[in-house]
Image: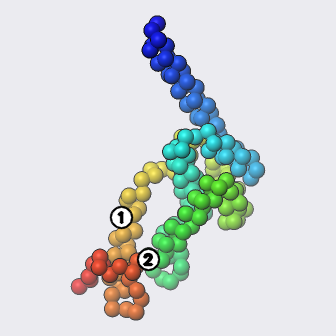
Amino acid sequence: MTRLGTARLLLLIGAATLAGCSSSRRIDGSGAATFERSVAMLQNDLPARRRDDFDVALAVIFMRAAAVDAGDLDADGDVDYFDARIVSDTAMSLLTEIQRGNLTSAAEKQGREVAAAYFKQLDGLGYDEVVELAGDLDVGSYVADMKRQVSRTACEWQGTARPPPLGNTSRIRRCD
């Protein structure tokens, strides 16, 4: 075997070993402490890009478990920019807590029942299963829906004292 062939074989064996190690980690959702520790160990085994995807997937699953969606969160009678802002702020706060390693405490802020259900839902899952459970991480369609909603809301605000979303009147569709 040539030197190049040996190097390729060693590289292939090394890659297979790394793939096997990172995919064998599983989340232990049997309790808060074991959950936090197992998530941290899984995060530490992942390369940066996969860790980012994993963290986002954890946040998406939690947002679903806690029933945080784009509904009328400020209870003003309509779903608008301000509701989307609340969802965005909640998601960013949660993602920050996940990246800091404070996922358990962030989950428990929503209530012990929500946290326990979240831990149970993720129990036994590895990276691939968590990302799959979160679904497609492409948020393009969600952003397009939110833009349409903001546009509709801007039309409703036209002629009222309430300011248009984002303070940008140049792109607001006129509603005639």
State left or right for residue 102 relative to residue 52. right
Q: Is residue 139 above or below residue 11?
A: below
First reached walking from the N terminus: tag 1 or tag 2: 2
Q: Is residue 91 above or below residue 71?
A: above
Specify the farthest residue to the top: 1
Residue 113, visible in the rendered structure: no
Question: Number of marks in the image?
Answer: 2
Residue at 47 percent across and 11 percent down: it is 3
State left or right for residue 42 relative to residue 134. right
Which residue position is annotated with label 1? 144
Where is residue 53? Give x, y as percent.
51, 48
State left or right for residue 157 relative to residue 125. left
Tell me which amino acid carries mark 2: Asp
Residue at 67 percent across and 42 percent down: it is 41
Q: Counting other residues with Cα less than 10 Å from the Cα at mark 2, is it few (<14), some (14-19), or many (20 or more)?
A: many
Q: Counting other residues with Cα less than 10 Å from the Cα at mark 1, is it few (<14), some (14-19), or many (20 or more)?
A: few
Residue at 55 percent across and 63 percent down: it is 92
Q: CA distance from mark 1 to mark 2?
A: 14 Å
Where is residue 176? Give x, y as percent.
23, 85
Label 1 element class: helix
Q: Is residue 155 above or below residue 38?
A: below
Residue at 67 percent across and 61 percent down: it is 106
Query: Residue 125: which numbered mark, if any?
Result: none
| Quadrant in the picture for residue 65 | bottom right
Which residue position is annotated with label 2? 80
Where is residue 165? Give x, y as percent.
40, 79
Q: Is residue 124 above or below residue 84?
A: above
Tell me which amino acid carries mark 1: Ala
**Which colouring convention does the figure follow?**
rainbow
